[in-house]
Image (cartoon, rainbow, N blue to C red):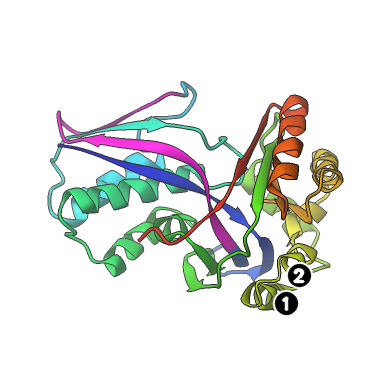
Amino acid sequence: MTVSEKAYAKINISLDVTGRRPDGYHEMSMPMQTVSLCDDITIRMEGEGVRARCNLRYVPCDERNLAVRAALRYLEAIGEPDRGLRIELGKRIPVGSGMGGGSADAAAVLRALNRAFDGRLSPEELSALAAGIGSDVAFCLHGGTMLATGRGEVLRPLPPLPPCRIVIVKPGFSISTPELFQKLDRAPVRIHPDTAGLIAAMEQGDLAGVCRRLYNVFEDVDDRRMRTIRQIKSSLLDGGALGAVMTGTGSAVFGLFADPEAAERCCAGMRKEYGFACTAEAVGKLL
């Protein structure tokens, strides 16, 4: 048997860090959106053990890969730990971009396997499994537009992002998530995003209001790479974006455009300058 699934990327419409938890994680508040940029996942029921293969040689294909970990956890949960699987990962989501590529792959594996095994696990059981694999996996499992709190696993549905075209740009470097959290801990957050105002603008379908409230507290961290992030944001705004912000801990930046033609023109220019740029659209619920 072979089963395939799309692994959709996520963006953080805004990102706030509200405190440090006793378990070492941080309390987050993040309106998040699934977007159409995706990896391709194909699973074949064959062989022994769980093995993966990826079109990018530098991506680990053992249990360090969240997709492999998700498959192992799923098989254990349904009582078939000895089942053999082969996972093919076709990566398009840039690695180290803050777009949840690894989490999206893990979530796609969970959806695909549950379909292959005739819905053996309920959505609630899948969510619990996802939360134990990684902080963004639960959101990537469900998809759509949600407010993620806790360490990212507590989800509340939000109104959809108002219609727009999204231009995503990734510079030629990645940013270490643990490193950025360490820097944030040394210099507490001074300015927090207006999350309530952002959600209200989404409820009203007010794209301009959403764009005025795009904000990521990690952009204020003392890191030389943030100069490039600011340059990309400025170029997106000059190209017609109503707002622009870094997603996650970076290094990808996205801009929201009301005019699809302006988005395509801007994207073409950004691709020449930074190497990776694409247009995308918001995606609704996946589960």
- In-front residue for pair 280/107: 280
The percent position of residue 282, horizontal first and vertical second, equals: 55, 55
- Secondary structure of residue under mark 1: helix
Crowding near the residue tagged with mark 1, few <14, some 14–19, many ≥20 C-alpha atoms within 10 Å:
some
Residue identified by numbered label 2 = 209
Q: Which mark is residue 235?
A: none
Residue at point 39% right, 58% down? 286
Q: Quadrant of residue 279?
A: top right
Q: Is residue 2 above or below residue 140?
A: above
Image quarter in which the C terminus is found: bottom left
Mark 1 vs mark 2: in front:
2
Query: What's under tag 2, amino acid-wise?
Result: Gly
Q: In the image, what residue type sits under mark 1?
A: Gly
Residue at left offset 57%, top offset 61%: 32
Can residue 64 be seen in the rendering of this structure? no
5 and 242: which is toward the camera: 242
* Residue contact at pointers 1 and 2, CB within 8 angstroms: yes
Q: Which residue is mark 1?
A: 197
**Residue 125 drawn in magenta:** no
Q: Position of residue 77 (x, y in %)?
A: 20, 56
How far from the left and from the top, in percent, is residue 212?
A: 80, 65
Which segment is the magenta one? 32-55
Q: Is residue 283 above or below residue 190?
A: above
How many numbered badges does the structure rendering display? Answer: 2
